[in-house]
Image (cartoon, grey):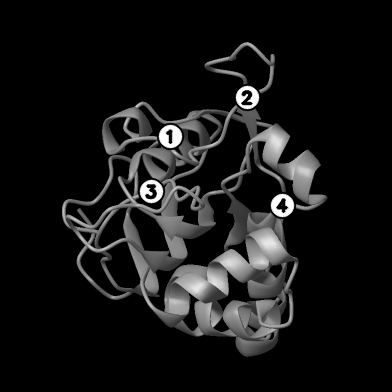
Amino acid sequence: MEPLPNGLDGAAALCRYEGIATGLVTSLKFRHHRDAVGAIGAALAVMGGPWLEQATICWVPAAPANRARRGFDQGELLATATARAASDRLGQRIPSRALLRREPSDLGESGQTPGQTGRTRVERLVGPVLRPTMAVPHRVVVIDDVTTTGTSLERAAMALRSAGAGEVYALCVAATPVGATVSRVDDADDGDRARRPGSPHR
């Protein structure tokens, strides 16, 4: 991403969050259509390339209310599929672990932690409060579905580095085009543009 969110050594997105990509992500998140998860994970594993070697994969956790409502965390599904594909591709075990938890940062009247759905860009820049769940390995690759402002990825990187990560990369399914209006049915969290594997580290 240019500029790359603080704390990341590199980040990339498979496509822009528009057209077919929008339908694909919303079908997974809101209609429980998981048919494409394996294919998306395989594509993320290819895109991640050398970033995934000797890495541990984690994901930006969904807001608790969203996970409870859906019955799953789409980030976890994508991270698991990416880890499986990367393990096959690299011939080494690439684990997927819940290295981050999402803390209640802005409780509303319901007492539930809201996601990013329906927020303005300014509100999204506040970002979620993410904490490490354990000491983490040297190299971590964070998976997220849609990137918008870069804030969640920055928060994830900061939390992971505080727990011992030396290198942190991000792989996302889609990125919202710069200047685009984010749909109210989308709870995209992070940045706008992607730095591809192999680009110079900042």
Q: Nearer the viewer, residue 116 or 39?
A: 116
Q: CA distance from mark 3 to mark 2?
A: 18 Å
Decide which of tag 4 and tag 1 comes sooner along the chain.
Answer: 4
Real-space Cα distance between discs 1 and 2?
16 Å
The three-letter code of the residue at mark 1 reads Arg
What residue is drawn where x is 75% and y is 66%? 32
Q: CA gap, disc 4 to disc 2?
A: 15 Å
Q: Which mark is residue 16?
A: none
Residue denoted by label 2: 113
Q: Nearer the viewer, mark 4 or mark 2?
A: 2
Q: With 80 as the anchor, is 18 left or right in this view?
A: left
**Vertical placement of 150 versus 34: above or below?**
above
Q: Nearer the viewer, mark 1 or mark 2?
A: 2
Are the two marked residues, 4 and 3, in contact with CB atoms closer than 8 angstroms?
no
Q: Which residue is mark 1?
A: 155
Q: CA distance from mark 4 to mark 3?
A: 16 Å
Mark 4: amino acid? Asp
Q: Secondary structure at mark 4?
A: loop
Q: Residue at x 71, y 65 (%)?
A: 31
**Drawn side of residue 98 relative to residue 11, left or right:** right
The answer to whether 111 is drawn above or below residue 138 in the figure is: above
How crowded pointer 2 is (Cα within 10 Å; few <14, some 14-19, many 20+) is rated as: many
Q: Mark 3 vs mark 2: which is more N-terminal?
A: 2
Amino acid at the residue labelled 3: Asp
The disc, 4 or 3, on the residue closer to the chain's N-terminal end is 4
Residue 190 - label = 3
Q: Which residue corresponds to mark 4? A: 73
Q: Position of residue 16 (x, y in %)?
A: 33, 72
Question: Quick one: 103 or 195, which is closer to the camera?
Answer: 103
- Give the camera-side residue of 108 and 49: 108
Measured as percent of width and height from the top left, residue 201 is found at 23, 59
